[in-house]
Image (cartoon, rainbow, N blue to C red):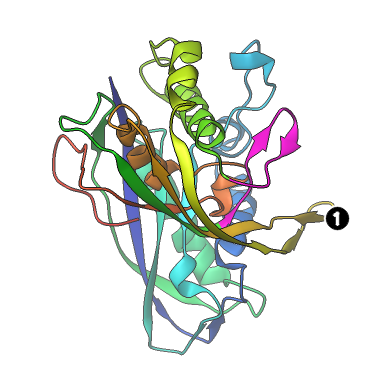
Protein backbone atom coordinates (compact mmCIF):
# COMPACT_ATOMS: atom_id res chain seq x y z
CA UNK A 1 0.00 0.00 0.00
CA UNK A 2 1.06 3.56 -0.67
CA UNK A 3 -0.04 7.12 0.02
CA UNK A 4 0.23 9.77 -2.71
CA UNK A 5 0.52 13.52 -2.22
CA UNK A 6 2.07 16.64 -3.76
CA UNK A 7 4.26 18.87 -1.56
CA UNK A 8 3.79 22.25 -3.27
CA UNK A 9 6.09 25.17 -2.45
CA UNK A 10 4.95 28.65 -3.48
CA UNK A 11 7.53 31.46 -3.80
CA UNK A 12 6.74 35.16 -3.49
CA UNK A 13 8.35 38.58 -3.36
CA UNK A 14 6.73 41.21 -1.16
CA UNK A 15 5.61 44.44 -2.85
CA UNK A 16 4.51 46.05 0.43
CA UNK A 17 5.02 44.94 4.05
CA UNK A 18 3.41 41.55 4.74
CA UNK A 19 2.84 40.67 8.41
CA UNK A 20 2.19 37.19 9.83
CA UNK A 21 1.14 37.44 13.51
CA UNK A 22 2.40 34.85 15.99
CA UNK A 23 0.49 31.59 15.72
CA UNK A 24 -1.50 32.76 12.71
CA UNK A 25 0.42 32.21 9.42
CA UNK A 26 -1.29 28.99 8.34
CA UNK A 27 -4.68 30.23 9.54
CA UNK A 28 -4.27 33.43 7.50
CA UNK A 29 -3.34 31.41 4.41
CA UNK A 30 -6.22 28.99 4.84
CA UNK A 31 -8.77 31.76 5.34
CA UNK A 32 -7.54 33.79 2.39
CA UNK A 33 -7.38 30.71 0.23
CA UNK A 34 -11.01 29.79 0.98
CA UNK A 35 -12.33 33.30 0.30
CA UNK A 36 -10.41 33.69 -2.94
CA UNK A 37 -11.18 30.18 -4.15
CA UNK A 38 -14.89 30.79 -3.68
CA UNK A 39 -14.65 34.04 -5.64
CA UNK A 40 -12.71 32.83 -8.68
CA UNK A 41 -13.40 29.09 -8.98
CA UNK A 42 -16.49 27.16 -9.94
CA UNK A 43 -18.83 25.98 -7.19
CA UNK A 44 -17.85 22.38 -8.00
CA UNK A 45 -14.14 23.04 -7.50
CA UNK A 46 -14.78 25.08 -4.35
CA UNK A 47 -16.88 22.32 -2.82
CA UNK A 48 -14.40 19.63 -3.81
CA UNK A 49 -11.40 21.38 -2.28
CA UNK A 50 -12.71 23.55 0.55
CA UNK A 51 -16.03 22.05 1.66
CA UNK A 52 -15.83 18.35 0.74
CA UNK A 53 -18.66 16.13 1.93
CA UNK A 54 -18.90 12.44 2.72
CA UNK A 55 -22.45 11.24 2.05
CA UNK A 56 -22.55 7.86 3.76
CA UNK A 57 -18.79 8.03 4.14
CA UNK A 58 -16.37 6.43 6.63
CA UNK A 59 -17.58 6.30 10.23
CA UNK A 60 -20.75 8.13 9.21
CA UNK A 61 -18.91 11.47 8.98
CA UNK A 62 -20.69 14.24 7.10
CA UNK A 63 -17.57 16.27 6.25
CA UNK A 64 -14.55 14.87 4.48
CA UNK A 65 -11.08 16.04 5.51
CA UNK A 66 -9.91 18.91 3.34
CA UNK A 67 -7.33 17.70 0.80
CA UNK A 68 -4.52 19.99 1.93
CA UNK A 69 -2.36 20.99 4.89
CA UNK A 70 -0.47 24.28 5.09
CA UNK A 71 3.10 24.50 6.31
CA UNK A 72 4.06 28.06 7.28
CA UNK A 73 5.55 27.75 10.76
CA UNK A 74 8.74 29.53 9.65
CA UNK A 75 6.66 32.70 8.99
CA UNK A 76 5.45 32.89 12.60
CA UNK A 77 5.67 36.50 13.80
CA UNK A 78 7.49 37.62 10.64
CA UNK A 79 7.23 41.00 8.96
CA UNK A 80 8.25 40.64 5.33
CA UNK A 81 9.76 43.86 3.96
CA UNK A 82 9.09 45.13 0.42
CA UNK A 83 11.43 43.37 -2.00
CA UNK A 84 12.03 40.46 0.38
CA UNK A 85 11.37 36.93 -0.85
CA UNK A 86 9.41 34.40 1.16
CA UNK A 87 7.68 31.07 0.67
CA UNK A 88 5.27 28.64 2.26
CA UNK A 89 4.22 25.07 1.53
CA UNK A 90 0.92 23.34 1.06
CA UNK A 91 0.74 19.55 0.95
CA UNK A 92 -2.01 18.47 -1.46
CA UNK A 93 -3.77 15.11 -1.12
CA UNK A 94 -6.17 15.42 -4.06
CA UNK A 95 -3.56 14.76 -6.73
CA UNK A 96 -5.71 15.12 -9.82
CA UNK A 97 -4.14 17.06 -12.68
CA UNK A 98 -5.71 20.43 -11.89
CA UNK A 99 -4.83 20.54 -8.19
CA UNK A 100 -1.49 22.34 -8.46
CA UNK A 101 -2.78 24.86 -11.00
CA UNK A 102 -5.76 25.60 -8.77
CA UNK A 103 -3.65 26.41 -5.73
CA UNK A 104 -1.19 28.40 -7.82
CA UNK A 105 -3.91 30.50 -9.44
CA UNK A 106 -5.67 31.20 -6.16
CA UNK A 107 -2.53 32.28 -4.31
CA UNK A 108 -1.34 34.40 -7.22
CA UNK A 109 -4.61 36.31 -7.02
CA UNK A 110 -4.65 36.40 -3.21
CA UNK A 111 -1.10 37.78 -3.06
CA UNK A 112 -2.02 40.57 -5.49
CA UNK A 113 -5.02 41.48 -3.34
CA UNK A 114 -3.06 41.34 -0.09
CA UNK A 115 -2.06 38.88 2.64
CA UNK A 116 -2.44 39.06 6.39
CA UNK A 117 -4.09 41.64 8.64
CA UNK A 118 -2.36 44.56 6.86
CA UNK A 119 -3.24 43.18 3.40
CA UNK A 120 0.38 43.32 2.34
CA UNK A 121 0.72 42.75 -1.39
CA UNK A 122 3.09 40.23 -2.93
CA UNK A 123 3.82 38.65 -6.28
CA UNK A 124 3.94 34.92 -6.92
CA UNK A 125 7.32 34.22 -8.54
CA UNK A 126 7.37 30.43 -8.73
CA UNK A 127 5.84 27.14 -7.70
CA UNK A 128 7.36 23.69 -7.50
CA UNK A 129 5.89 20.36 -6.52
CA UNK A 130 6.05 16.81 -7.77
CA UNK A 131 3.94 13.77 -6.94
CA UNK A 132 5.37 11.76 -4.06
CA UNK A 133 4.50 8.21 -3.08
CA UNK A 134 5.07 6.90 0.44
CA UNK A 135 5.26 3.20 1.23
CA UNK A 136 3.00 1.99 4.02
CA UNK A 137 4.64 -1.42 4.41
CA UNK A 138 6.61 -2.06 7.63
CA UNK A 139 10.10 -0.67 7.88
CA UNK A 140 12.62 -3.26 6.63
CA UNK A 141 14.68 -3.22 9.84
CA UNK A 142 13.57 -3.39 13.47
CA UNK A 143 12.76 -0.04 15.08
CA UNK A 144 12.69 -0.09 18.87
CA UNK A 145 12.52 3.60 19.73
CA UNK A 146 11.38 6.84 18.11
CA UNK A 147 11.13 10.45 19.15
CA UNK A 148 8.37 12.68 17.82
CA UNK A 149 8.45 16.48 17.94
CA UNK A 150 5.07 18.20 17.92
CA UNK A 151 6.01 21.39 16.09
CA UNK A 152 2.64 23.14 15.98
CA UNK A 153 -0.29 22.93 18.43
CA UNK A 154 -1.71 19.41 18.37
CA UNK A 155 -5.06 18.13 19.66
CA UNK A 156 -5.77 14.42 19.85
CA UNK A 157 -9.22 13.09 20.67
CA UNK A 158 -9.97 9.76 22.30
CA UNK A 159 -13.47 8.61 23.25
CA UNK A 160 -14.83 12.07 22.34
CA UNK A 161 -12.42 13.72 24.81
CA UNK A 162 -9.25 15.72 24.25
CA UNK A 163 -6.31 13.51 25.25
CA UNK A 164 -3.98 15.03 27.82
CA UNK A 165 -0.96 13.01 26.63
CA UNK A 166 -0.02 11.59 23.22
CA UNK A 167 -0.19 7.94 24.26
CA UNK A 168 0.91 5.84 21.31
CA UNK A 169 -2.36 3.93 20.64
CA UNK A 170 -4.22 7.26 20.48
CA UNK A 171 -1.59 8.90 18.26
CA UNK A 172 -1.32 5.94 15.90
CA UNK A 173 -5.10 5.57 15.74
CA UNK A 174 -5.62 9.17 14.65
CA UNK A 175 -2.85 8.90 12.04
CA UNK A 176 -4.12 5.58 10.69
CA UNK A 177 -7.71 6.81 10.45
CA UNK A 178 -6.68 10.04 8.71
CA UNK A 179 -4.58 8.20 6.11
CA UNK A 180 -7.38 5.75 5.45
CA UNK A 181 -9.99 8.49 5.03
CA UNK A 182 -7.77 10.58 2.75
CA UNK A 183 -7.12 7.51 0.60
CA UNK A 184 -10.83 6.68 0.55
CA UNK A 185 -11.87 10.17 -0.56
CA UNK A 186 -8.98 11.23 -2.80
CA UNK A 187 -6.86 8.18 -3.52
CA UNK A 188 -6.95 4.46 -4.18
CA UNK A 189 -9.36 3.49 -1.38
CA UNK A 190 -9.33 2.96 2.39
CA UNK A 191 -6.55 1.01 4.04
CA UNK A 192 -6.91 -2.73 3.55
CA UNK A 193 -5.83 -3.62 7.08
CA UNK A 194 -7.29 -5.06 10.27
CA UNK A 195 -7.81 -1.86 12.25
CA UNK A 196 -8.57 -3.63 15.52
CA UNK A 197 -5.53 -5.89 15.37
CA UNK A 198 -3.28 -2.96 14.53
CA UNK A 199 -4.69 -1.06 17.48
CA UNK A 200 -3.94 -3.96 19.81
CA UNK A 201 -0.33 -4.11 18.60
CA UNK A 202 -0.01 -0.35 19.04
CA UNK A 203 -1.02 -0.86 22.65
CA UNK A 204 2.32 -2.60 23.22
CA UNK A 205 4.26 0.58 22.42
CA UNK A 206 4.92 2.66 25.51
CA UNK A 207 5.26 6.40 25.99
CA UNK A 208 8.58 6.57 27.86
CA UNK A 209 9.11 10.32 27.92
CA UNK A 210 6.68 13.18 27.45
CA UNK A 211 7.72 16.84 27.46
CA UNK A 212 4.78 18.84 26.17
CA UNK A 213 3.46 22.35 26.81
CA UNK A 214 -0.11 23.58 26.26
CA UNK A 215 -0.58 26.47 23.84
CA UNK A 216 -3.74 28.62 23.83
CA UNK A 217 -4.69 30.16 20.47
CA UNK A 218 -7.93 31.37 18.94
CA UNK A 219 -9.06 32.21 15.42
CA UNK A 220 -11.91 34.47 14.38
CA UNK A 221 -14.07 33.33 11.49
CA UNK A 222 -14.35 36.06 8.84
CA UNK A 223 -17.63 34.47 7.75
CA UNK A 224 -19.44 34.21 11.11
CA UNK A 225 -17.38 36.50 13.35
CA UNK A 226 -17.16 33.73 15.95
CA UNK A 227 -13.92 32.75 17.66
CA UNK A 228 -12.71 29.16 17.74
CA UNK A 229 -9.89 27.63 19.82
CA UNK A 230 -7.01 26.36 17.68
CA UNK A 231 -4.53 25.61 20.43
CA UNK A 232 -3.14 22.32 21.64
CA UNK A 233 0.20 21.07 22.88
CA UNK A 234 3.71 21.34 21.48
CA UNK A 235 6.84 19.54 22.59
CA UNK A 236 8.22 16.04 22.26
CA UNK A 237 7.47 12.43 23.13
CA UNK A 238 9.54 9.26 23.03
CA UNK A 239 8.18 5.77 22.48
CA UNK A 240 9.61 2.27 22.87
CA UNK A 241 8.37 -1.03 21.52
CA UNK A 242 8.07 -2.93 18.27
CA UNK A 243 7.66 0.07 16.01
CA UNK A 244 8.67 -1.10 12.51
CA UNK A 245 5.04 -1.64 11.46
CA UNK A 246 4.05 1.87 12.50
CA UNK A 247 6.98 3.97 11.29
CA UNK A 248 5.62 4.35 7.71
CA UNK A 249 2.35 5.74 9.08
CA UNK A 250 4.20 8.19 11.31
CA UNK A 251 6.36 9.19 8.36
CA UNK A 252 3.19 9.95 6.39
CA UNK A 253 1.92 12.03 9.31
CA UNK A 254 4.82 14.43 8.79
CA UNK A 255 3.01 15.50 5.62
CA UNK A 256 -0.67 15.10 6.47
CA UNK A 257 -0.60 16.24 10.11
CA UNK A 258 -2.35 14.55 13.00
CA UNK A 259 -5.30 15.52 15.16
CA UNK A 260 -7.78 18.34 14.72
CA UNK A 261 -7.65 21.24 12.24
CA UNK A 262 -4.67 19.96 10.28
CA UNK A 263 -5.72 21.96 7.19
CA UNK A 264 -4.43 25.17 8.76
CA UNK A 265 -1.16 23.77 10.01
CA UNK A 266 -2.01 22.18 13.35
CA UNK A 267 -0.57 18.79 14.22
CA UNK A 268 2.71 19.20 12.31
CA UNK A 269 5.24 16.65 13.53
CA UNK A 270 8.86 15.72 12.97
CA UNK A 271 10.11 12.17 13.42
CA UNK A 272 13.53 11.06 14.68
CA UNK A 273 13.90 7.59 13.20
CA UNK A 274 16.34 6.18 10.64
CA UNK A 275 13.74 5.49 8.01
CA UNK A 276 12.37 6.95 4.79
CA UNK A 277 9.48 5.36 2.92
CA UNK A 278 9.55 7.45 -0.24
CA UNK A 279 9.46 5.39 -3.43
CA UNK A 280 10.63 8.07 -5.85
CA UNK A 281 12.62 11.25 -5.26
CA UNK A 282 12.99 12.18 -1.60
CA UNK A 283 10.68 15.11 -0.79
CA UNK A 284 11.98 18.12 1.06
CA UNK A 285 11.33 18.47 4.75
CA UNK A 286 7.76 19.68 5.36
Q: Quadrant of residue 211?
A: bottom right
Magenta segment: does it hold 154? Answer: yes
Tell me the residue at 62%/76% (across/down): 21
If the image is split into quadrants, where does the C terminus sit? bottom left
Question: In screen coordinates, is 36 left or right of 172?
Answer: right
Tell me the residue at 52%/42% (across/down): 258
Number of labels in the image equals 1
**Magenta residues, start to end:** 153-165
Q: Quadrant of residue 4?
A: top left
Residue identifier under label 1: 226
Tell me the residue at 57%/72% (across/down): 114
Query: Please, what secondary structure does the residue beneath circle 1 have?
Result: loop
Question: In screen coordinates, is 269 left or right of 143?
Answer: right
Question: In screen coordinates, is 161 left or right of 208?
Answer: right
Magenta segment: does it hold 30? Answer: no
Q: Which of these two is toward me, 283 or 157?
A: 157
**Percent of width and height locating residue 50:** 59, 39
Tell me the residue at 67%/36% (across/down): 157
Q: Which of these two is toward me, 28 or 125?
A: 28
Vertically, is 79 above or below 261? below
Q: Which of these two is toward me, 85 or 187?
A: 187
**Percent of width and height locating residue 242:** 32, 30
Q: Which of these two is toward me, 172 or 135?
A: 172
Amino acid sequence: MTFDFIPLRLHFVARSPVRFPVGMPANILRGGFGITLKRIASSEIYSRIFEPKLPGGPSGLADAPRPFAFRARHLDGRLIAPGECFHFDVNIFDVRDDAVSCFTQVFSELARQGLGPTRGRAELTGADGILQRLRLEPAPDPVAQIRIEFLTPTELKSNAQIAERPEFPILLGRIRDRISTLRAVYGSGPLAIDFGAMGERAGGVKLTRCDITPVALERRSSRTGQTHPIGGFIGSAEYKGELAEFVPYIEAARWIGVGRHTAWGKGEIQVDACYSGVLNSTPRSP
